[in-house]
Structures are given as C-alpha cells and as structure tokens.
C-alpha cells in the first residue's frame, strides 16, 4: 500500500480503515484480506501527533444539543444551542456583529476597494518601520501574532478590513437579517412534530435554504474581497466563523429533529437529509467543521452501510474533504486530533486503500484529489504564516505533509492519464469542465505551497510544477474549450467558471514568479547578488513566457492563456527590487551591477510603466508603487549606481514617482487597499532625504513640504490614508536636525506640536531629534545650548510625572554635545554638572537607559576639549578624562571604556587647536589607541579610516619639515591594516586628499609628481571597480594646486593635463568632478609662477590662453575678480613683448568689465601690468562694470 502521509501504525490505520468501511458497508463490515495485507506492510514508526490523523477524536451524538465540547480553544467564541440558550449565556455571532459594526463606524473614513493582499494585511499587525531598514519590504510571513493569540488578536481587532469597509458592513448586516429570518423559520419547524409529508418537505426545504445561505456567504464574500478568495488559509473573521458555524448547527438540528420522528422515513429522504447536513458543514469556517462533517458521515454509514442503493459514495467523502478545507483556516493546535491537512490526506489514503481492496465505487477522482490538495495547502500555508515551526528539526511534520501533497498530485496525474486514455475520441469530451477546473486548481495549490515551503534543497519544484500545468493546458486546451460548451450552464455561470479558471492560472504564475524569492527568506535572503540576479532573470523568463502564450492564443482560449496581471507584475518587480538590498553590495556585486544593461530600479520602473499602459482605465494596487519607491531608495547602497550621478537624482526620481502615484490615486487609477500604504511611501522618501541631504535648509524645507502633502491627503481622504506615524516624524526630525539651518530648532518644536495634532505621542527619539536640532544650529557654533537643555528638562518633568518617556543617556549626550558645540556657552562646569546628574540618576534607579556609556563619555571629552581656556588646559583636561575612562574600564566598568568615537573626537580637537606640540600629541594619541586595541584584543577601538584620515589632516596643516614623511608612514600602516582584512581602515577619497595636501604643503621638488601619482592611482582603482575612490573636485583641486606650488618645470602643462582628465570624468557622468573657478585659478597661478626657460614660459602662455578660452565657453565656471587679477598677473610674468601684453591685458580687462567683476584688486593689477591703459580709465567707474562683485572694497 502506498500511503500519502508517511508510514503509519498498522493497528491505528486498520481502525480508521474500519471506520471508513463502516461508513460504506455498515456496522457489520469486515476488512478484506487485500486491505489487511496492505495495512500490515506499514510498520508503526510514526508519532502520536501523526496517529491523530488516523484515529479521529470522539464525537457527540447527532441527537445531542449543539454545545461544543469543553476541549474547544478558549479564544473561539463559545456557542450554545440556540433552541435553549438564554440571553445571559449567549455569545453567538449577533453579539460579534454588534461589536464589529460599532467598531467600524466610528470614523468618517472614505470607503476603498476591499481587496487586501496577505502582505498588507500582515503589515497592519506590526509596525514595519521598527524592523531593520531593509527588512520592511520582506513582508511575507512571520509578521502574524503568536499561535495562541491568532484568533483573539487578528480576527477580533483587524478582521483584515472587513469591519472598515462600508460595503462589507452592509453585507454583514444583510446576512445578519437573513440569518434571523431563517432562524425564525427553523425554530418554528423544530417546535412542531414531523409527522406528515408536508412537514418533512418543509424541513428538507429549510435545510436546503441553510445550505444556500451558507454557500452564498462564501461566494458573495469572494466577490467582495479578493483577499478572502486568494488567501483561504488565513484566519476568518469572528463574523465568518460565528455565522457559518451557527447556520450549520441549525441545519444539523433539523437533521436531528427529522431522525427523532416516530415513523420510519423513506431512505431517499433520510439520505438527502444526511447529505444536506454534511454539505452545510462543508461551508463552515471553523476548526471542527471537518470533524462534524465526518461524524454525520459515520452515522450515515451506520444507517445505510452495506445497502448498495443508498450507502455513501465518493461524493460524500468529497464533501468531507471540502469541510476539512474550510477547517484549515481555523485550525488551532489545541485540537489534538491533528490538522485538517493531515486528516484530509488520511481520508484520501484510506479511500485509496479501500479502492485497491476492490471497492470500485470509492475510486478517488480528480475533484477528491483537488479538495485534498487544497486542504493540505491551506494547512501548510497557515502553519508557515504563523511560524509554528521555528527550527529545521521541528519541521519534519511540515515536510511530510508537503511530501503527501506532492504524492497526491502525482496520483492525480496518473488518474487523469488513465481516465483520458480510457476515453475514445468518438465518445466526446474526455473530462468535464468541473474536472478540468479541479485539475488546474490542484496544480495551482501545489504551486502556492511549494512557492512558500521547501521540502529539501530542490528549489525548482514550483517551476517544474508550472511546467506541468502549462503542458496540461497546452495539450488539452481544445478539450477544455469543448467541455465549456458541453457543461450546459447559462451564460453567467459559464463566464464565472471561465473567470475562475483564468484567476487560478494567473495565481499559478504569481506563485512561480515569487517562489525562489519567498523560499530565500527562510534563510534570510539569497546567498549573494549573483543568486538574486539569477532568480530575477528566471522570473523574467517565466513572465515573458506567460505574455508570449497570451499573445499567441486564440480569443476563445484567453481564459487558459491570460496576459500578465498586476499581481504578476508586482511579483516580477519584487524580484528585481531584491537585487538592491544593502547586504548584497560587495565590490564584486558592484562590478556586476555596473555591467548590467538595465539597472534593477530602472527595470522595476519600466515594468510599472508597462503595467500602467496595460491597465489604462483600470485601477492598480498602490503596493507596487511602494516596491519601486523602495528600489530607488536603495541606490545609495550601491556605488556602481550613485557614483555615476549626484545623490540628488534618486531624490528627484522618488519625488516624481510619489507625485505621479498620488495624482493617479486622485483620478482613480491607483487604489490603496491597506491604509498604511501611503504612509509607507512617504516614509521611504523621508528616509532617503535623511540620507542624501546631510544638511542645509533645502533638505529641511523638502521634508516639511512632504509633511504638508501628507496632511493634505490625510484630510482629503477623511483620515483613510497618509496618516504620519511615529516613524515619519522621527525621520523628519532627523532631517531637520541635520540641516543646521537657523530655523531648524523652531521647526523641530513645531513638529512636536503637529505630532500631537495627529495623535502621535512623542517618544525619546523625537525629543532627541529636537535637542539635536538645537545643538546643530549654525553647525560650527551652537548659538544657545540652553534651549537644548530646556528640552531635556521637559523630558525629565514628564518622566517624574508618569514615566512615559525617559531622559535617556542619548538625550543627555546630545545636550552635552550642544554645549560642546557652543563657543560662547560651553563650559567644563556645565558639562560636568549634566554628566554627574545622569550618573546619579543611574545610581538611584539602576535603569540601563540611564547607564553612562562610551558615547556619553565621548561627548563629554569632546565638549571639555573645546571649552574656552587659557592655553591648552581644556585639551589637557580632556586627555585626563580619557585616562580616567581607560582606568575605569580596566577595573571592570566596561560600559564607560573609551570607544573609537572618543579617541577620534580628541584627534579632531587637536586638529582644531593651535597647541605647538599638536602633531606629537596626535601621534601619541594614535599610538595609544592602536596599542590599547592590541593589548585588549578589542577591534572596536582600533584606529579606523576616520582616525587615520584625521591624523593625516593634522600633518597636512603642520609646518614641520618632515610632516609628509610621517604622514606617509601612517598611511602605509593604514593600507597594511586594510590589506590584512580590516575593512574599517580602507583609505577613502578624504584620506587621499589629505595625503595630497601634505605634499602640497611640503615645498619638496617632487611634490607635484607625487600628488599626480596619487591621483592617477585613484583614477585607475575607480575604473577597475572601486567606485569609492572615484576622484571628486576636491581631489583634483588639491593635485592641481600642488603643481601650482611646485618648482618643477612644465608645471602649467601638468596642471592643465589634470584639468583635462577632470573634464573627461565629468562628461562621463561623474558629477562630483565638476570643474570650478578655484581650480581654474590654480592653473592660472601655475602659469604665472613658471620660472623656467623661454620654452617653458611659451608652454605656460599657451596654457594661459587655453584658460582664457575655457572661461568663455565653460558654463560651469563662474569667474570672480580673483580670476581676472590672476590672469593679469600671469600675463605680466609670461609676456615680455609690450604690444602682445597690451592686447592680452586689454582682452582680460574688457571681459572682466563685461561680466561685472571689476573691483579694486583688478584695478591694482591692471596698473602694474598695463599702466597706460589704467590711466585712461574714467574717474567714475561705471556701476555695470562692478555689478556682480559680491563685496565692493571701500574707496572703490
């Protein structure tokens, strides 16, 4: 015997086998020898959990009242028989309806379309923005509350939008009214005796009405909510559970009432009643609906088993499987009888055994296989969504159940082949439309399962299953179309069935497109960028295959070969977006990214535009716009993308996409099925802005403008969409605090008020943002840090009042940093007062949120080192504090040990001081940092890029003769540290610029050559893929000025050559290498200070003339008076011939006047270079000659 759920105990299997035969043959049934032999072939190796599938739980008599057993989970609504219930003990669906309707109607939110995707519904349960930055996109599974909380939290609080939508509320109300009407009729029938034919007919008619009512609930809800139709495994609402359960109990009460009659019933009537009661339970969304249906089947079998005319057929078992299918979305582990999927596979296994034993009437057909596979699918996806199995070793049952599904699918394939083979062509169609539908649905359910659940290392099961489905449809498309005509349905029913098949096929492609991406999440992500890229390419092949088949199919087969849907587009967009995750961004991946024909975010936007064209006139789910926005926001993680352009191109792109999305929403082309979608979109833009715009008033205004837009949409939708949340305000405050604008602090204060207006309670991070805004006003000098302390005081007052927020260590650190950044108000006494205050607070409370840490000590060090003092006393005091921190750490106070931030802050303070031994102090501190890192084996304080770069910058500002040699020594140590495997010590552009500046200040003969070599090396490395070293304008300016300061021959030509390389970089998309006037002045200076022979001066003059021509044509260079003064001085130095010099000087002066850049310094230079022209100038200089001069010197 082949089992579908692993090896089972032969005794238990035989017992359940007997129950099946009892239902078929009656209570005197016996086990055929063939079945005995097959059962005995399975040794008892399974667990008690698995045995439960075979040994069903005990059940109540059909004649008992409809109270549930005490074993039902407490979080399900308790139900009692409506015939004897009192108002005191009833908690049925009517009470739930009242709660639902009251909860749903307290706002004026506009109604939106009811379709909610699984991901969006899950996102409503947990704030996705509290997760790691890149993880919020990954919202498939794992977001649902804990298992035991599922129905109590999810269904009662959210119901996935059912209680929020006015159309669903109206539908609830209509179903409530219909239920009460049917209940009244049922109560009247139950109160009267069933003695005559009309009474029996009325009772059966009432049972049929209950079945019609129950069937309509599923069909109507599916028409109202795509989420319910597409996610049957997900928990139903309390309304669905209650009303269907109570309705089925009404039907079962009618059956019990019929069977209690004194007179014997005709077999046809009794059989019909049993079938109607079973059918009722097959529509119930409850954990016990499958069991209740099986109970009725047992009693049906006990009554008619052995009677060939009336005993249960395979159709009765299909009804049981449909009931298990409905049960799977309500299953709870409190049900010790096993999950619905296990039970369904158990039923299929035993039917297969009975059929093999010789009962030809119980041959499993396509519909039975399909119902079984659907029940297993729902069970498995329900398990996955609630993360029942957290560890691989606990997932054996999941894998076994999935293996059973695969086995069932293979059996269905064999059954299909056998059935089609036995049909001759002249006998008409091979299978009915219902059979074809079931076969296609079985493959779709298999795809949905194996797109989410892995049963081994084979990740291609879903793709192979799609291939089988495509082959089934392609091979039999003509027969399927013939079966439509043969079905004999009316036009409406026919179209509904075709729509159902089309939807199933579309969902199959969605599953296949997403399968590898979803499975990768079990491991966190794909192994690397290459794996993610291969997945995107594979998915695109599936997508294009679907599109091609749709284009090639005849019109009457469109339902079998549909064109890609918005869901298919979104699945493919997600695959391309996946490539942009930060942790894939390695040097190798960036090289691969740079070589892509179309970058992932551009690919995603291209697909979105295709979808917009395809869906012209039809609304698109706004969630796909979130995906594309997120893709754009990730480009900052990829040097291969952002180094080709300035950062701002990404910000402009997301602004444009956001504007387009909301414009389409306004005209009805975009819908938001989850009210948090728009908030998520704006938060993506806020986050991007906070990263791109590190400072500046423009960044602040940009965020405030976005907040105004959110408020507009929030008001326009009556609060349905775009409500800013705590995360939104946190990002806005971050951008404001980084701006350094004069109005940043006042704007930050206003943000706190706006939070209250939106009902968002400020938390510690929001107050921290306001303090940082005060501490960064003016950036280099905080005007009044006392205002930052006032915010700290406000937080302390709230803490003392109700403990809702805490004055955390981070808040104290920010306040101390505000004092440290103020030239006027910084004082050691104030800093130490705040420091001691926090230490005392921690001592009193032992609360870790108040524990002094290395960041706090770093802020204190920084503030003390910058405090005003005579000489270098403040700096020396900071060094003493560092000694104390190290000592505290060494005696066991680990948290207060200095970190890298503390050491680098002191290095920065030394670089800003004017102490005579600054270079030696800096080197000693660096050695101290390095030695301590080695002694403690603590890499967290090992010198990093920032520390090395700061030290080299100190050398660059030193006048010591050996500064460049000492800088080179530290640079080589930095390189070795990086080459030995420390990525945090990698030299960057700032490091190389500082090293070039050391050569620039060295006054050595080979300084220009050395600077040029460093620049060339950076250009080569960036070309080879290290885009972090792509030179910018600062690097080029330093190298050119190094040549200008050198005494080398040919320095003007060398400087001009660097400028040409710079222009080439800029023309190729390196926006950071844009030439400017400072660089042009350095080249002119190189020309003017050429001291070689006549040939050298001729070359320098040629460069000077090139510069003059460049100034006329290059729009990105804006000359200043300094430019023209330098040109005049260079002309004097290079041109000995008076006539030529006069001509050149006149041209320079005329251009200067025409551009309105004439000032006193230019006139002084003209007087020295060309006095005869100077004396001819008018006494009163025309204002237009000096109109563009920023500052006019006195007397001019």
Image: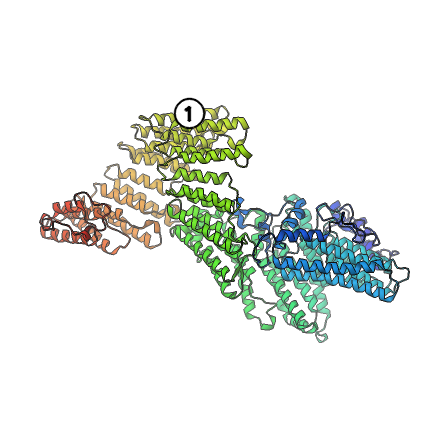
- What percent of the width, then of the height, locates residue 550? 56, 68
Q: Which residue was labeled with disc 1?
A: 883
- Image-based side of 7 in relation to 967, left or right: right
**The image quarter in which residue 907 lies:** top left
- Could one spot residue 965 in this view of the protein? yes
- What percent of the width, then of the height, locates residue 818? 40, 35
Given residues 222 and 542, the one toward you in this image is 222
- Image-based side of 744 in relation to 401, left or right: left
Identify the residue at the far bottom of this view. 426
- Placement of 419 over or under 154, stated as above or below: below
- Give the class, few, some or many, for how many residues have Cα within 10 Å of label 1's Cα (few <14, many ≥20): some
Quarter of the image for the C terminus: give it: top left
- What percent of the width, then of the height, locates residue 371? 71, 59
Identify the residue at the far right of this view. 263
Quarter of the image for the N terminus: give it: bottom right
- Image-based side of 975 in relation to 202, left or right: left
- Image-based side of 841 in relation to 288, left or right: left
């Amino acid at each position: 015997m082949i089992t579908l759920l692993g090896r089972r105990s032969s005794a238990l299997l035989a017992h359940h086998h007997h129950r099946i035969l009892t239902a078929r043959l009656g209570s005197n049934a016996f086990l055929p020898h063939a079945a005995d032999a097959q059962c005995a072939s399975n040794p008892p190796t399974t667990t008690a959990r698995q045995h439960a599938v075979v040994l069903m739980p005990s059940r109540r008599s059909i004649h008992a009242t409809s109270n549930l057993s005490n074993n039902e989970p407490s979080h399900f609504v308790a139900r009692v028989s409506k015939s004897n219930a009192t108002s005191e003990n009833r908690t049925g669906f009517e009470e739930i309806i009242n709660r639902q309707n009251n909860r749903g109607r307290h706002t004026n939110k506009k109604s939106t379309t009811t379709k909610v995707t699984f991901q969006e519904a899950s996102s409503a349960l947990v704030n996705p923005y509290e997760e790691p930055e890149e993880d919020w996109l990954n919202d498939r599974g794992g977001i649902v509350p804990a298992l035991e909380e599922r129905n109590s939290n999810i269904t009662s609080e959210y119901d996935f939008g059912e209680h929020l939508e006015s159309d669903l509320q109206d539908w609830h109300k209509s179903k409530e009214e219909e239920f009460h009407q049917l209940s009244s009729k049922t109560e009247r029938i139950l109160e009267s005796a069933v003695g005559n034919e009309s009474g029996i007919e009325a009772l059966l008619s009432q049972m049929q009405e209950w079945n019609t009512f129950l069937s309509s609930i599923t069909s109507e809800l599916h028409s109202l909510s795509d989420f319910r139709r597409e996610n049957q495994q997900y928990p139903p609402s309390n309304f669905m559970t209650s009303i269907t359960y109570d309705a089925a109990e009404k039907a079962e009460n009618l059956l019990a009432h019929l069977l209690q009659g004194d007179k014997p019933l005709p077999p046809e009537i009794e059989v019909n009643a049993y079938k109607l009661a079973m059918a009722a339970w097959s529509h119930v969304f409850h954990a016990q609906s499958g069991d209740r249906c099986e109970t009725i089947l047992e009693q049906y079998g006990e009554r008619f088993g052995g009677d060939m005319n009336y005993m249960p057929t395979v159709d009765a078992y299909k009804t049981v499987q449909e009931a298990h299918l409905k049960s799977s979305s309500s299953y709870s582990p409190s049900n010790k009888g096993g999950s619905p999927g296990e039970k369904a596979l158990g039923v299929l296994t035993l039917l297969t055994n009975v059929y093999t034993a010789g009962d030809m009437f119980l041959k499993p057909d396509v519909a039975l296989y399909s119902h079984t596979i659907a029940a297993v699918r729902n069970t498995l996806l329900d398990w996955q969504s609630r993360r029942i199995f957290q560890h691989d070793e606990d997932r054996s049952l999941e894998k076994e159940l999935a293996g059973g599904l695969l086995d069932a699918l293979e059996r269905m394939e064999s059954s299909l082949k056998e059935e089609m083979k036995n049909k001759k062509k002249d006998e008409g169609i091979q299978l009915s439309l219902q059979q074809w539908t079931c076969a296609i649905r079985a493959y779709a359910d298999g795809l949905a399962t194996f797109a989410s659940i892995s049963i081994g290392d084979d990740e291609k099961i879903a793709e192979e299953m799609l291939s089988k489905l495509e082959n089934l449809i392609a091979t039999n498309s003509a027969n399927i179309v013939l079966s439509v005509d043969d079905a004999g349905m009316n036009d409406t029913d026919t179209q509904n069935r075709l729509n159902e098949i089309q939807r199933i096929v579309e969902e199959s492609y969605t599953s296949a497109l997403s399968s590898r991406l979803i499975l990768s999440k079990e491991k966190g992500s794909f192994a690397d960028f290459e794996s993610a890229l291969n997945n995107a390419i594979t998915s695109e092949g599936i997508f294009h295959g679907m599109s091609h088949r749709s284009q090639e199919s005849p019109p009457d087969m469109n339902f079998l070969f549909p064109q890609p849907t918005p869901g298919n587009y979104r699945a493919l967009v997600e695959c391309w977006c996946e490539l942009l995750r930060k942790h894939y961004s390695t040097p190798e991946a960036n090289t691969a990214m740079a070589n892509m024909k179309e970058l992932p975010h551009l690919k995603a936007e291209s697909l979105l535009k295709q979808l917009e064209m395809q869906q012209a006139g039809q609304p698109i789910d706004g969630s796909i716009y979130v995906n594309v926005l997120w893709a754009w926001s990730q480009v900052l993680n990829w040097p291969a993308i952002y180094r080709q352009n300035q950062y701002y191109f990404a910000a402009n792109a997301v602004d444009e996409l956001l504007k387009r999305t909301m414009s389409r929403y306004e005209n009805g082309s975009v819908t938001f099925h989850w009210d948090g979608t728009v908030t998520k979109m704006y938060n993506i833009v806020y986050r991007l802005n906070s990263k791109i715009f590190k400072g500046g008033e423009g960044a602040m205004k940009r965020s405030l403008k976005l907040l105004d837009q959110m408020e507009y949409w929030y008001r326009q939708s009556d609060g349905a969409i775009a409500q800013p949340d705590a995360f939104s305000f946190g990002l806005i405050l971050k951008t404001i605090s980084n701006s350094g604008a004069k109005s940043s602090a006042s704007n930050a204060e206003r943000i706190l008020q706006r939070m209250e207006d939106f009902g968002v309670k400020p938390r510690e991070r929001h107050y921290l943002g306001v303090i940082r805004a005060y501490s960064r006003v003016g950036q280099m000098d905080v005007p009044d840090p006392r205002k930052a302390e006032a915010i700290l005081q406000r937080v302390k007052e709230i803490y003392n009042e109700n403990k809702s927020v805490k004055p955390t260590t981070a808040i104290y650190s920010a306040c101390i940093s505000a004092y440290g950044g103020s030239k006027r108000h910084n004082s050691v006494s104030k800093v130490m007062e705040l420091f001691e205050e926090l230490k005392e607070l921690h001592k009193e409370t032992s609360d870790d949120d108040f524990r002094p840490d290395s960041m706090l000590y770093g802020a204190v060090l920084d503030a003390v080192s910058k405090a005003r003092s005579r000489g270098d006393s403040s700096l020396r005091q900071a060094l003493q504090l560092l000694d104390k921190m190290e000592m505290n750490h060494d005696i066991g106070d680990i948290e207060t040990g200095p970190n890298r931030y503390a050491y680098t802050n002191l290095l920065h303070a030394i670089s800003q001081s004017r102490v005579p031994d600054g270079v030696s102090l800096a080197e000693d501190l660096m050695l101290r940092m390095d030695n301590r890192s080695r002694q403690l084996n603590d890499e967290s304080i090992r010198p990093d890029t920032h520390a090395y770069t700061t030290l080299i910058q100190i050398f660059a500002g030193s006048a010591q003769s050996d500064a460049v040699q000492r800088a080179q020594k530290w640079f080589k140590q930095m390189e070795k540290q990086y080459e030995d495997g420390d990525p945090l010590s990698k030299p960057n552009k700032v490091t190389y610029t500082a090293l070039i500046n050391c050569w620039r200040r060295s006054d050595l003969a080979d300084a220009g050559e050395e600077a040029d070599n460093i620049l060339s090396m950076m250009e080569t490395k960036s070309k080879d893929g290290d885009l972090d070293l792509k030179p910018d304008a600062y690097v080029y300016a330093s190298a050119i000025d190094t040549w200008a300061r050198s005494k080398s021959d040919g320095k003007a030509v060398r400087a001009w050559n660097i400028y040409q390389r710079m222009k080439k970089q800029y023309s190729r998309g390196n926006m950071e290498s844009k030439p400017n006037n400072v660089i042009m002045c350095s080249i002119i200076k190189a020309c003017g200070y050429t001291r070689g022979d006549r040939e050298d001066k001729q070359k320098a003059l040629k460069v000077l003339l090139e510069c003059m021509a460049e100034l006329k044509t290059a729009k990105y260079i804006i000359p200043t008076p300094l430019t023209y003064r330098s040109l005049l001085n260079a002309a004097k130095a290079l041109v000995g011939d008076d006539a030529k010099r006069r001509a050149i000087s006149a041209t320079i002066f005329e251009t200067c006047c025409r551009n309105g850049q004439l000032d006193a310094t230019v006139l002084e230079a003209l007087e020295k270079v060309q006095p005869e022209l100077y004396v001819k100038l008018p006494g009163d200089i025309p204002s237009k000659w000096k109109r563009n001069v920023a500052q006019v010197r006195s007397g001019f």
